[in-house]
Structure formats: C-alpha cells, structure tokens
Image (tube, grey):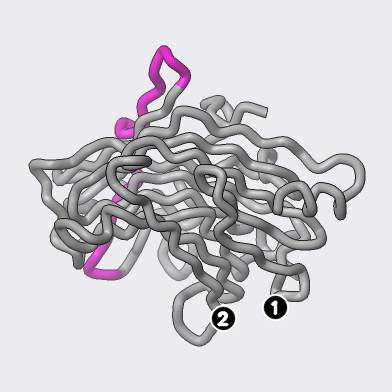
Amino acid sequence: MNLLDKTRWDNFLPWGNIINPDTDKEIGMNDKLVTYHPDGSVHFGCLNANFNGWKRDKTWNVVNTSTQWSVGAIVSKEEYRTHFGTYHFKFRLPHFRGSWPAIWLIDLHPAPPKGDGMGMPPEIDVFEHFRKDGFLTRFHITHSYQDGPTYENNSVQSKIYWRFWPLDLMDIEMIFTWLPAGMTWTVNGRSVMTVSSDTPNYPVLPMNLIMNAGLGLEWKPKVGKFEDFVIYQATYDQLTGNTESHLAVSR
C-alpha cells in the first residue's frame, strides 16, 4: 500500500492546524509546504513567515489565529488509520539547526466513552531527528515508544541510530514492524530497537500516522539554511498469516 497517495491525508489535527496551541512555540501545519513530485516523492518544507491558521478553544469552537512559523505535515484520515503490519520508509533528512522531522503514530480517535479508539497515549515515534546544534546531532536519529502523551510522568523507551559520515549521510531506509507480539525498528539493515507487547499501554487498535518536517524553536533554527525533509518511499503491508513468524523475520 502506497502511503504517499495524497488522498489518504489531512493537513490538520482534530484541534486545528496549529501544532502547539496556547504556547509560545506555536507552529502552523501548512499544506502549501507539502509538495508532491513527479518521481513519487513528497517534500516537507519549513517557513519563517506569518501563517494564518485555526484552532479549537476549550469549548471546541473554531478560533482563527496566526503563527510566525509553519511546516509541511500530513495526518492520516480516520478511515486510513493503520494497524499491525510492516512499514517501509526511504527518506532524506534536512541538515539545518532547528530541524525536527518525524514519522509517528498516535490514535486521534477517542477512547471510550467518547469513541472506540485508544486516544492518547501511547505514542510511537517511528523516528525523530532532533537537530539541536551545528554538528553532532546531524549524525543520529531517535526512535522511541511512549506510554504517555508527553515526556513527563510516563515511561519512554528510546534508542539512537548513529549515522557515520559519509557512508549513510543522505538517504535512510527504515523498516518498522508493529505486531501483536511486539514491534521492531530496522535502519539501513541494522536492528536498532525492539518493544515487547507486555509494555504498558501497548497499542492494539489502529492508529493515525503523521509525517512532518517540524522545527524546534528553542534550538534557534537557521532560517537561511532550510532544507526539505524528503520521503522517497512510504509503504505499508498489513499483517497477514502467522504473527510470530513475522516478528522472527523482522528481528
């Protein structure tokens, strides 16, 4: 299944297209910064300019607002939530200070009694690239499983994949496998992380996939050096057959 099919995606979250509403680090999700190219790739950009967006207030009414920063981001529609299976990604990371591209899974469908989903937590960060400085952090990407909605008061399992220059400086190939028995991360042929199904809040219902460029405003982004986060390939193979054999192969 081709995950880069544009019909699968929205450019907003249930609470709006402002990523961090009511903070001093608000960023808009700008559909104009998501561009589809003839080679099948999708480019996610960043922009330091006034962006007019919207969010929902505490009574869930729509409020128009604006931010000085915007990024390209896509959120899977409810009917395209994904479940157990194998995800294949091939991408190129941006290399400017402040970049924060990510591919991640959460369930935006509410838990009972409001809905029949899981809600949040958990959160699966298939990968994140925290470019916090001018040099060292360009060489690693981070994978994490969180059983809570933030990095506080919850359990976080995390691993770093170190990229050694110049062998794999540009393109990254990743396989993420999510099964009833556990989940695994493989990057450029190397097994990086495994999470077992007995982990607290292990997800057993479909989740929304999110792909985005992203900016860490506290890292003082280098505006003149913005580069796109480029995804060349993103496919999803839904789980069929024996789950234990799938997990053994993924390891």
Q: Residue furthest top?
A: 38
Marks 1 and 2 in Cβ contact (< 8 Å) = yes
Q: Which residue is mark 1?
A: 200
Q: Nearer the viewer, residue 232 or 208?
A: 232
Q: Which mark is residue 171?
A: none
Q: Which mark is residue 155?
A: 2
Q: Nearer the viewer, residue 121 or 191?
A: 191
Q: Nearer the viewer, residue 134 or 104?
A: 134
Residue at 40 percent across and 56 percent down: it is 141
* 141 left or right of 139 in image: right
On the rendered image, what quadrant is the C terminus found in? bottom right
Q: Element type at marker 1? A: loop
Residue 38 colored in magenta in the image: yes
Magenta range: 23-40
* Crowd band around label 2 with a 10 angstrom C-alpha radius: few (<14), some (14–19), many (20+): some
Q: Amino acid at mark 2?
A: Ser
* 190 left or right of 231 in image: right
